[in-house]
Amino acid sequence: MADPGFPPDTLGLVPMPSRRAVLSRRVFSHVGLLIGAGLIAVIVIMAIFAPVLAPYDPYAQDLSNRRIPPVWHAWINDHHKASWAHPFGTDRIGRDYLSRIIYGARISLLIGTLAMLISGTLGTALGVAAGYFGGRIDMFVNFLVTTRLSLPLILVCLVIVTLFGGSITTIILALGFLIWDRFAIVMRSVTLQIRNLDYVTVARANGCSSAYIIFREILPNVANALIVVATIEMAVAILLEAVLSFLGLGVKPPLPSWGLMIAEAKTDMFFDAWLIGIPGIALFVLILAINLVGDGLRDVTAPERRA
Amino acid sequence: MTALLEVDGLSVTFPATAGDFRPVRDVSFSVDRGETLCIVGESGCGKSLTALALMGLLPKWARRDARRLELQGRDLVGLTERQLADIRGRRMSMVFQEPMTSLNPAYTVGEQLSETYRRHYLSRRGVARDRAIYLLETVGITAAASRLRQYPHQLSGGLRQRVMIAMALICEPNLIIADEPTTALDVTIQAQILHLLSALQKRFGMGMVLITHDLGIVARVATRVAVMYAGQIVETGTVDEVFANPLHPYTQALLRCIPVPGRVKRGEHLGSIPGAVPTLMGDLGGCHFRNRCAYAHAACAPDPILMNEVTPGRGYRCVVPAAICAARGHGAAA
Amino acid sequence: MPAYAAKRFAVALLVLFVVSVLTFTFTNVAVDPAIAIAGEGATDAQIERLRREYGFDRPLYVQYGEWLSGTLAGDFGTSIRQRRPVLTMLAEKFPVTATVGGLALILAFVVAVPLGMVAALRPNSWIDRFALGFAVVGMAMPTFWFGLVLIIVFGVTLHWLPVSGTGTAAHFVMPSIALSYYSIPIIMRLTRAGMIDVMASDYIRTARAKGLLPRTVLFKHALRNAVIPVVAVAAVQFGHLLAGSVVVESVFALHGIGYMAWEALHAADLPVIQAVVVVLAGFYILLVFLSDLLNAFLDPRIRIA
């Protein structure tokens, strides 16, 4: 033991920093993650407080003020109608574009979140079961995943939404039951890795039930991978909703879905490009923010897998 | 006559914004022809990085510094990658720890063996093939000719390590560096591989640097020993000197951790070293072992401790005079 | 190898069978084909007569059997809307989709693979940062919106390229770019990750330790192993590109099978919808099967099991 008058901590050798400290330092030094999280926070607040924040009713038509360009047209080409009264301008039937963008965030986030939760539950259950039990169950899940992957995603979404009607509920259910494949694949491989670790073997040797092992030993340790996949799938769901609505087979007018707004502006896009520009950028920013958070979380929790 | 390998003041640094990570600090040793130097230490002490630094195989972002790094009198420090490539595999070669992953899965054993020979001797395929068969036989692989057509995944770990050894020896290098060559293998295979390496080293008259954490291996094959702790060599000497008369408190503590039949009584506790290895960021100042040393005092902290040379080739890194160290280590000698 | 191929083939057939059952059942449950044929304003009696005439009153599995045997013989039925054989329509439209998909795949590989390789060999260099930034931006940009932006910039503003139709080779430039943009980030990231893994692998260290020349290490030892996962993804991506063509075809008014399916959806034209879904799925399954074989050929661990 060290000399009593000279305790080890004064010897000046720094011990290795704790895992938690390393993690929190990584989170707060990851620029992409911070930017993404900030943007998402802004969009979520926008969606929640839409009635307060939106300057107009998103459905109110004003035929005397159609296709007013956004405010910056007043600066760059002296457009006489552009003003702060409609910062993002108005669409072809005079609805305030800013208000529609704000309300549109609700649709994207609602569909993205719920579809991700459904597919996440389904995919995780299948993936963990396949990885944990192996054998026939694994083969069966593999077969399901292969089958699902061979279905042309966008087309099948279109078919389901067309045949069963294009309500938001149908879209959420269709997406939820179609995009679980990545959850299943990733959860299966992560579970396989963890399943063979010593602490799981110990739990099995001690006679713990499968349910106990899955919920107490495996799920807490696949959480990191799960969150990363969840961000990817949420982005996929939001993009797919936009595609469906753009193709005229998703959310029905007059709902202010960003994809639908782009579709409605298509005929005017040669004259007023901002009509498709603004909702497109809104979509882009939301997806970008989600992807930045997903990439950032992966970097932070498993930096060796950065790709 | 100069030694086969001369290393003086070798350091490895990984630059980082939060403070440089310096896993190898001022390491010096030499290896003669026909001699086996064992570098022994616990994991993370920098012994594997020392080996990679010798071969010039460090990751790109790592920085290697050395006052002197010479193989057969030829300076290795300023060489270009191309010049280094001419030396690697021919003058010095390396056997790695993981035989399961160290061979390329996409090519046959024969191709991987003979390409080394063709690279350095520009010989025809037939000649290289015969040479490969000869080497496989030398490392004790039966039916060598048919093994050439096999892929690594078709071989067991022990066989793969034999192939790795054959590959390292195919150009008859003067120096072979073996980094924990038996750690990943079954215990019975470990002894065979170790015996093989030792026999081949004598037969070809090579110098060998064997890196291990296993003191049992050191006792069996080493001529000389270098004990590493936290990036530094803390003690060097012949295997008899170090085992019979350990000077550095770390070596003494390490030797107390090994059970010796007849000496350690039934039910008696084996030694262990309290505390944890320090992080190798930045400048540690003083002795690296001072937070775990039973004899630490104020003089251990401020200034870097230099290697005390007792006799040529026998040294230790501690502020305490050798006589006192020797007396303290009396109970630890194996 | 033959045993491996046979097993893969059996699985592929089984998947295709399940897909066809799913497609057939779902479409028939969701829409009453008799009503779809009769159109709006038909009386109940007319619908009932049609139902008996076409055999829609029989159990679903009997109808499926009939449909399957027709499909296997190359007869996908008749389009309700156009009153033409679906097979003829498919044969007309498929070349357009395949051309755009094929061009997009080539473009994606030509851009993504070298970019991923260089990014992997020079981690954290400006080119690596550019590639990663490009991937992040690319994955966030909706394909249809990117297509519209291309039209506005290169079609309307600069007048470089035609904005819609399939008349000349120039007509295929923008659709191919728009479609390839979807695959580039995925292929780029995969190449980069694969190359980084391989370059960090023990056997590359061994190859360097043997004194092999840097170019031998890179082209002989690294590339061969890094290319395996990329080859696997090529086939899968081609399948995705064909399936995703419905979006690009509608943006650029290309008359491929995606556009055909989209029109058929608006008219509840079941035989066409079923055929397109099953053909695209079948094509994807075939591609995956072929890429499995190619993989096995490249990787001795699978070839010689």
Image (cartoon, rainbow, N blue to C red):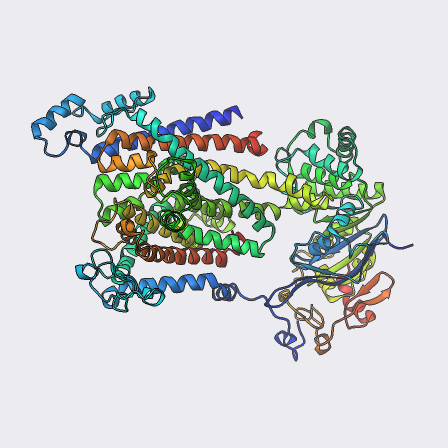
Q: Establish if B161 lies above or below C45.
A: below
Percent x, y for residue A206? Answer: 45, 49
Q: Is residue B100 left or right of residue A167?
A: right
Percent x, y for residue C105? Answer: 46, 39
**Residue drawn 65% across the image and 44% down it:** C204
Decide which of B275, B83 is in the foreground and name it.
B83
Decide which of A126, A41 is in the foreground and name it.
A41
Percent x, y for residue A108? Answer: 30, 54
Percent x, y for residue A171? Answer: 26, 47
Decide which of C112, C237 is in the foreground and name it.
C112
- Furthest residue to the right? B1
Q: Is residue C217 left or right of residue C193?
A: right
Residue A306 visible in the snapshot: no
Q: Which quarter shows the C terminus of chain C? A: top right
Q: Is residue A293 left or right of residue C79?
A: right
Residue A71 visible in the snapshot: yes
Q: Which quarter shows the N terminus of chain C? A: top right
Decide which of C217, C39 is in the foreground and name it.
C39
Disc tally is 0
- Furthest residue to the bottom? A5
Location of residue A35 by image quarter: bottom left
Q: Establish if B277 lies above or below A283.
A: below
